[in-house]
Image (spheres, rainbow, N blue to C red):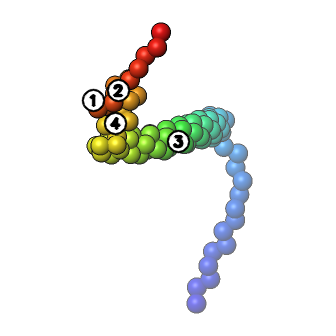
Amino acid sequence: MKKRPDFKLVYRPGKTLTKVALLGVIVVSTVTLIALHCAIGASQDKAQALKQDALGLQQENTRLEQMNQLQDTDEGFIQAAQQQGMVDPDTTIYHFD
């Protein structure tokens, strides 16, 4: 059976340029991650605001659909005419000045 050679881990100081380059990569990566985190937060806030706007628009749409359905009835026509100051032809109105 062969004996494995012993390996020793020897620390050798690297070149200064290598250390500076590695430090630069770490700094740039950290700044990029912070910028992305801020952008994600802003996008989430915008998405939440858009969801609120969409909910408000859906409620307004529902209200308008209900008003539209009411106006399609005779009662709705009469109510709309009264709101505009119109009267039923069979009604007599007296104005006193």
Q: Which residue is mark 4?
A: 78
Q: Which residue is mark 2?
A: 92
The mark lying in front, picked from 4 and 1, is: 1
Residue 86 lies, in percent from the top left, at 34, 25
Of the image marks 3 and 4, the number of the one nearer the N terminus: 3
Quarter of the image that includes the N terminus: bottom right
Distance, label 2 to label 3, CA atoms, is: 49 Å
- Say which element carries label 2: loop
Whether tag 3 and tag 4 are in contact, CB under 8 A, the answer is no
Q: Which residue is mark 3?
A: 52
Residue 81 lies, in percent from the top left, at 34, 30
Residue 12 lies, in percent from the top left, at 70, 49
- Say which element carries label 3: helix
Graded by Cα atoms within 10 Å as few (under 14), some (14 to 19) or many (20 or more), the crowding at tag 2 reads: few
Residue 65 visible at all = no
Of the image marks 3 and 1, the number of the one nearer the N terminus: 3
Residue type at numbered disc 4: Ile
Residue type at numbered disc 1: Pro
Is 2 or 54 nearer to us in this picture?
A: 54
